[in-house]
Image (spheres, rainbow, N blue to C red):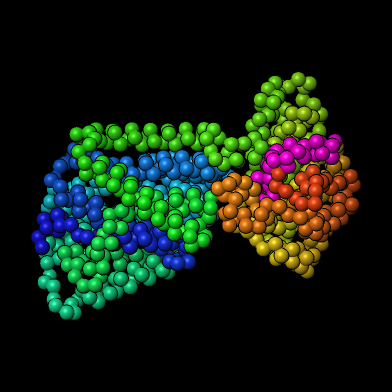
Amino acid sequence: MQESQLRQTYVPHIDGLRAVAVLSVILYHLKASWLPGGFTGVDVFFVISGFVVSASVDRLPAVGGWQGLLRFYARRIRRIVPALVVCLLVTAVLSALFIPESWLSETSDKTGRRAFFGLSNWVLASTGNDYFSPRTEFNPYTHTWSLGVEEQFYLLFPMLFLAWARGGRGRALSLGLFALATLASLAYALRLVAQGGQEIQAFYVTTTRFWQLGAGVLLYQAMSLAGRFTAVPVARGISWRSPVLLLAVAALGYGLWSARPGHSPWPDGLWPVLSTGVLLAVLHGHPQGWTGRALSSAPMVWVGKLSYSLYLWHWPVFVLFRWTVGLETVANGAIAVLLVFALAWLSWRWVEQPLRHGARGPRTNGRWVLLGLAVLVLGAGLQSALVKHQRHYSLSTVSRHPLDWYPYAKGLKKEVPDCQVVESQIPVAGGQARLLQRGDCPGGSGTGTVLFVAGDSHALVYNELLRRKVVQDGGQVRLYGSGGCALVGMQGWRGPNPACDAYTRNVLDDIQANARAGDVLFLPGLRVPRLAEQYQLFDIAQVQADLASPAAVSGRAGEVAVAIEQLRPLAERGVRIVFEAPKPVLPAPPYRCSDVFNRHNPICINGMEIPRAQTEAMRAPVLDSLKQVAAALPGATVWDPLPLLCPGDVCKPDLDGRPLYFDGDHLSGYGNRVLLPSFREQVR
């Protein structure tokens, strides 16, 4: 086969390889245990993309300079942008309808916005959450990271490849440039692995992924330079290709099964890259044998042709199922997969094909590029508008009633327009603290008492209560908070946390340096184990057993002694210390279970209510320990929110139809307002 034939012949087994890649990714995302390394199907895509984009450019008449660049970018825009923009906008609408703002979804909107410009991989790399964490699993735009890698690769590709079209030395130059860039990328990936702790960066960024796309480009260039590389006669029976293909298929299967989270793209991405390269090289022009026939079969080719749309749509569909009815049952999984294929076909038939191969659109490459950029900017603007106005059309009760659900105190400005809370940051070793104080308000600044509030996320979630108190009573609030780091947490028995210990010391040092007689130190925190995270449930019987275990009893006794020693200097100075008694913890997160469309989600299976007697039993040993600490400190007291949060025999997530909690243990904005009068009385 001559080089011109190599460039122009359609090779159906490439679509078959695309099918293998996309089905592996879909299967992994549907249930990871079914194909534990299926996420490396993306690595297969990268090699194919490098190979195919080289072939597609090389088969066109040579055009240099700006015209060559514009032609390349116009073709990429027609291939990528239409289906991407449609998918992102539909996802934005559905996300606004069904997904409220939360810890699980806090990076979603930014990821989606950056996805229009091929930058979502850098957003995900900067969040500190890896590809396998809950916040990425519930982000409907997570999958666009790989599109970002490809789009950034395409920005560089023509700069390195256009010399190829000149022939002769130009080809050697292009081959050398790609070889250097590929080796540099691989070396950088190896360096991050050697450094350790860089798994998130290594997974998402283009600099560690370029070598996989570059491998595809180098393969195409090597095959082209070989001339008759693929023209070796096909022997009947067993030939040298049979064992090579068998090894390549085995290596691909091994990679798709055995790849480990945190070990990609190196070293576990090596097997998919090598095996894909071998399959492309050996089968090109010779798709005989069971491997070639299987990959070139009609079903595989059909899936391969839909692979881009399948990849685009499968993830947002799966994520929306996770947020609403759940994806755990066989029935829901089957419905989700059918919906994915239906949406992918519609996208391929009515968006991809007409704009990619039809005559519609601008007549020049330059105008195609301008149109593509304009559509991307417009799409990102529409997505931002959809997010901004979510509360006006969302089906989520959380999004429709943000003032009740979120403790942001955003309604305070309308309630008290002539008084503002001034917030500033105070540097503290290992972090920061917030300083809240009343600004220009009628009645002056109020009392000179300072309220110090220190704890974990349960301290931070008192934001609305504290702001309202500042408006009503004046004074200052110094708020220290770090997730999972409660002062006098009474859960140290669950395992050491050196980072929290250091944070606690720094906070206490800062309070020691600034507190005066008559000031108040309020210590809230999660002091009993959760029954539900925002994304998973815990066994209630096991939680109760753990609380009563010898390790827990001994651990609390030790914390009592340490707390008395740490806090005694403050108490003896005249600082009044107020401990928060354990609040009820709920068996399901209300913000995920309060709508008709999510009430039957598996996360809600235990219901949102818990008998008060069970709550009292869980918190009794912790409350007893807190009382021991308070009794040993002059002027210390324990404030108990339980009577207000659970006035009956059953602790409920709401009061008179308004939410007391946001998730399984954090208060809502309305919950803050319910507790405010009691809290003011306690610290007065």
Q: Which residues are magenta?
A: 655-684
> Going 31% across and 66% down the picture, which residue do you hit?
274
Regarding residue 498, the answer to whether it shows in the image is no
Q: Quadrant of residue 402?
A: top right
Q: Quadrant of residue 17?
A: bottom left
**Residue 659 location (% of width, % of height):** 68, 42
Q: Image check: 343 left or right of 194?
A: left
Regarding residue 300, the answer to whether it shows in the image is yes
Residue 348, compared with residue 304, is above or below; it is: above
Q: Image check: 601 left or right of 547?
A: left
The residue lying toward the viewer, choosing from 208 and 361, is: 361
Q: Within the magenta stretch, is there residue 676?
A: yes
**Residue 392 location (% of width, % of height):** 54, 33
> Going 27% across and 36% down the picture, which residue do you hit?
369
The residue lying toward the viewer, choosing from 284 and 212, is: 284
Query: Residue farthest to the left?
Result: 2
Q: Image check: 49 left or right of 55?
A: right
**Residue 243 location (% of width, % of height):** 25, 77
Q: Within the magenta stretch, is there residue 505?
A: no
Q: Quadrant of the C terminus?
A: top right
Query: Residue farthest to the bottom?
Result: 238
